Image (tube, rainbow, N blue to C red):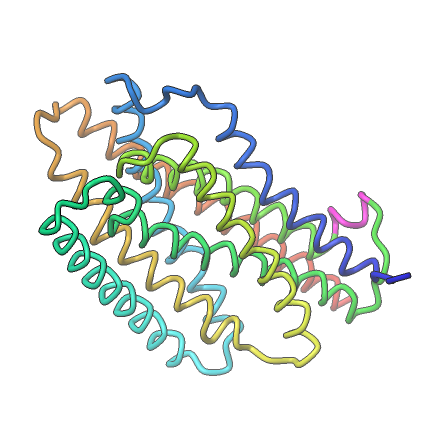
Amino acid sequence: MISISPVVLSALISTSLISLAPNIILFLLPHNYSKSKKNQTLLSLGQALAAGGLLGDVFLHTLPHSISNSKNEIIVGRMVLIGFTVFLVLDMIVRISENSMKTKHVNKTKKLFSSTVILNLTADALHNFTDGLAIGVSFAYENRIGINSFDLISLLKSRAGFASISVMMHEIPHELGDFAILVSAGLTKWQAVKAQFITAIAAFFGTGVGLLLMQQKTTIGDDILMPLTAGGFVYIAACSILPELLEEKCCSIVKRILQLLSFCVGIIFMYCVSLLEEHDHDHHHDHHEL
């Protein structure tokens, strides 16, 4: 009989809950979510929220975390630029393919393979992977300092608990924003839900890698994976989502103000997450002093 340690089991359960929560919310949305004019407006606001959340995630969460934990801060900056460039190249390739499909009059699958859809799903998978990485590292850390079993109260008070809550807090609005982007790009509700459910699998790989990396005592997650993902986030927000919103025709001043407010809400939400993580850092700093 295969025996799974409490740390690994707790990490997998935490990852499962975080991956399922946003998908359950998406599952409960109306079937004709993208059809009415009102819902189109909501999707537009969802895109603005996603852009603010992505940039807030990068500059208030991912990069500060990577820089503070990295052994070489210069590498972090380089990897952000590499991540941005990789997504630029991927976007160019997909757009060339789109033009090729238009020339050949292959329109049925165009929406499924548009640059917006592919870039978003790629970034979402990377994002879920790094979320899982953070969870795996956090639970492995608890094991390293001697905590090898968890009840609910001790889990919530642990670094792993704070990490899980932090990931949950930014994962739900992040996935809702991604859903808005996918539906606005032409996917149906069920296509968008299925696509995001598939990308959620990456979180489990991230959790496994995080548990292993802590055993090897490497900073590859902070030096390479997280800043690489950050570069992709900046590209999607600044070069894909925001230009699309700005190019909207017949957009009233009221709608523009609402879009700007939604963008700011996304940033503010990530700021709140960063405060939670700062509290987590202070909590464990005090723990080590004791």
User: Compared to 86, does 31 lie above or below?
Assistant: above
- Quadrant of residue 177 in the image? top left
Indicate whether residue 23 is drawn in magenta. no
- Toward the viewer: 228 or 222? 228
List the single residue furthest toward the right.
1
The magenta segment = 152-157
Question: Which of these two is toward me, 124 or 71?
Answer: 124
Number of disc labels: 0
Chief secondary structure of the magenta portion: helix
From the viewer's perspective, tell me whether residue 240 is left or right of residue 206. Answer: left
Foreground residue among 253 and 188: 188
Horizontal and vertical percent for residue 264? Answer: 32, 39
**Residue at (71% x, 55% y) in the render:** 11
Going 39% across and 37% down the picture, which residue do you hit? Answer: 179
Residue 201 appears left or right of 177: right
Question: Left or right: where does residue 265 sit relative to residue 248?
Answer: right
Q: Is residue 122 above or below residue 194?
A: below
Above-or-below relation of 204 to 26? below
Q: Position of residue 184 (x, y in %)?
A: 27, 34
Residue 167, horizontal then vertical, whole percent: 56, 49
- Give the position of the N terminus as an image quadrant: bottom right
Indicate the position of residue 183 as horizontal and vertical percent values: 32, 34
- Taking the image as shown, residue 175 lies to the left or right of residue 42, namely right
Q: Is residue 91 above or below residue 81?
A: above
Q: Residue at x 46, y 69 (%)?
A: 225
Q: Nearer the viewer, residue 186 or 68?
A: 186
Give the position of the C terminus as an image quadrant.
Answer: bottom right
